[in-house]
């Protein structure tokens, strides 16, 4: 079995058409899944969490943001991993500074 066509529907007009293809990639869009934090964390109009530039720190002390949810420019695996490392280090330093017993 192989792909022979995709059936498209314009969600604004309802128009439908079938386009013959041999393959396709699904684009899921760029809406960050940050809704649950909207009452607490600062975000831009598109829902990307705002981190203090050069850090992973958010407007709430001890809460750090990493990955695509705070990056509307690059949104790549390697940049997400890098910012994840930043957040891990920021969190570790934050916890160390608390000097918990
Ligand atoms: C089709 C496509 C192709 C791509 N190709 C490339 C490429 O070739 N090279 C490249 O570098 N990057 C590519 N990317 C981008 C790359 O996948 C992302 O930049 C990367 O996955 C971001 O990592 P992340 O950890 O920030 O977010 P994600 O990988 O999206 O991880 C977020 C996780 O959080 C989970 N989650 C969300 N909401 C909740 C919740 N409320 N509670 C608990 N868990 C939750 C999700 O299920 C998910 O597992 C591609 C992306 C797409 C969609």
Image (cartoon, helix red, strand yellow):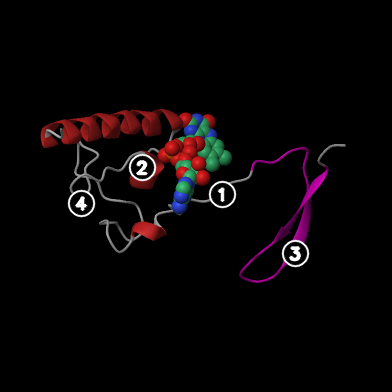
Which of the marked residues, 1 or 3, is nearer the chain's N terminus? 3
Q: Mark 2 CB in 8 Å range of ligand 1?
A: no
What is the spatial separation of the Cα atoms under label 2 and label 1, in whole angstroms?
16 Å
Which of discs 2 and 1 lies nearer the camera? The answer is: 1
Which of discs 1 and 3 lies nearer the camera? The answer is: 1
Q: How many labels, in total? A: 4
Position in image of residue 5 (x %, y %): 80, 47
Q: Which mark is residue 101?
A: none
Q: Is residue 50 above or below residue 78?
A: below
Residue annotated with mark 3: 16
Q: Which residues are magenta?
A: 4-25
Position in image of residue 28 (x %, y %): 56, 49
Which of discs 4 and 2 lies nearer the camera? The answer is: 4
Q: Quadrant of the N terminus?
A: top right
Which of discs 2 and 3 lies nearer the camera? The answer is: 2
Residue annotated with mark 4: 60
The answer to the question of whether label 2 and label 3 lie on touching residues, with beta carbons closer than 8 A, is no
Which element carries disc 4, helix, strand or loop? loop
Residue 91 occupies quadrant = top left
Q: Mark 1 CB in 8 Å range of ligand 1?
A: yes
Residue annotated with mark 2: 73
Q: Is residue 28 left or right of residue 44?
A: right
Residue 47 occupies quadrant = bottom left
- Residue 16 showing in the rendered view: yes
Which of discs 3 and 4 lies nearer the camera? The answer is: 4
Q: Residue at x 40, y 42 (%)?
A: 68
Residue annotated with mark 1: 28
Q: Quadrant of the C terminus?
A: top left
Which of the marked residues, 4 or 2, is nearer the chain's N terminus? 4
């Amino acid at each position: 079995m192989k792909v022979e066509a995709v059936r498209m529907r314009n969600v604004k007009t309802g128009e439908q058409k079938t386009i013959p293809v041999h393959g396709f990639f699904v684009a899921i869009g760029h809406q960050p899944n940050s809704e649950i934090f909207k009452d607490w964390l600062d975000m831009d109009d598109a829902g990307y969490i705002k981190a203090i530039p050069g850090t992973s720190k958010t407007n709430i002390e001890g809460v750090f943001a990493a990955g695509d949810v705070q990056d509307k420019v690059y949104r790549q695996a390697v940049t997400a991993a890098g910012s994840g490392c930043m957040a891990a280090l920021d969190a570790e330093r934050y916890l160390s500074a608390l000097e918990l017993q």
